[in-house]
Image (cartoon, rainbow, N blue to C red):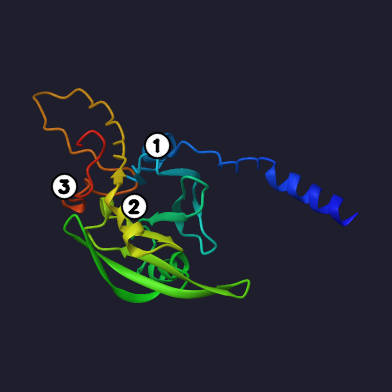
Amino acid sequence: MIVMAVFVLGVVALLPRPAARERVSVDVGRTAQQIAADKGWPLATADLGDAWHPTSVSFAPDSNGVPTWLIGYHHRPGDDQYVVLSQTRPGDGLDAGRLATWLDRQTRQGQPDGESTIAGTRWQRRSVDITSGGTVHARRSLVITDNTAPAGLATVISGDVDYPTLEQVAAALRTTPAQPTPSAPASPTSGSATPSPTSAPGTDSPTPSGLRSASAWATPAER
């Protein structure tokens, strides 16, 4: 009986294991374009090649009512690592206090941990130790909120990974240009008039050109 049991276990050990199923990828580019057209938000996506693939995307208010763009990326092969890109737009009722609360939520209450410089732009590092299932692991984040952020949007890249991995994602960010609202046809008048500049949707004035560094946050068309 013991010999038979050993033989069966040996056969089972030699059987091929089914390959782990990779999570389904989602089309974040099309989603970003739709939101850019509908809401006027020039959202970021990460062009990471085949090493990472987007597995989730959403644009919705968080539990505090802050509109938030979220993309989850899994690492290939095996989907063994996961990072999250999140963005929101300061202003539009999002004051400094609510923004600070949003950052705490996105970084899991991460504390300042130095800086990273990517393409000449400084990002704040944040880190926090999280206990899950009796295991302690570090949750690290890169944060940028000033006018050097992608298209002026507060941006967080976060995950249970090291800082070089987060920096790789930050370096791969590309913004989707917001689509301007078409101007209404001018009513016939005598003489000529200079058309007023088109404002970005949701703003009271034309979008400032200085909100985005062309070298660091180029749109696909500019690259």
Q: Of 214 and 6, which appears nearest the observer?
A: 6
Drawn side of residue 200 relative to residue 222, left or right? right
**Distance (Cα) linking label 2 and label 3:** 16 Å
Contact, mark 3 vs mark 1 (Cβ under 8 Å)? no
Contact, mark 2 vs mark 1 (Cβ under 8 Å)? no
Label 2 sits on residue: 169
Query: x%, y% of residue 162?
Result: 38, 64
Tell which circle, 3 or 1, labels the residue nearer the N-terminal end: 1
Determine crowd level at label 1: few under 14, some 14-19, many 20+ residues with C-alpha closer than 10 A: some
Above or below, comparing residue 126 to residue 188 in the picture = below
In this orientation, does residue 150 appear? yes
Q: Of 187 and 181, which appears nearest the observer?
A: 181
Determine crowd level at label 3: few under 14, some 14-19, many 20+ residues with C-alpha closer than 10 A: few
Tag 1: amino acid? Gly
Drawn side of residue 185 relative to residue 32, left or right? left
Say which of marks 2 and 1 sits in front.
2
Query: x%, y% of residue 158?
Result: 41, 61
**x 55%, y 39%: residue:** 24
In this orientation, does residue 91 appear? no
Tag 3: amino acid? Ser
**x 66%, y 40%: residue:** 16
Tell which circle, 2 or 1, labels the residue nearer the N-terminal end: 1
Q: How many labels does the image show?
A: 3
- Secondary structure category for the residue under label 2: helix
Label 1 sits on residue: 29
Label 3 sits on residue: 215
Residue lying furthest left? 191
Query: x%, y% of residue 98?
Result: 42, 69
Drawn side of residue 151 relative to residue 27, left or right? left
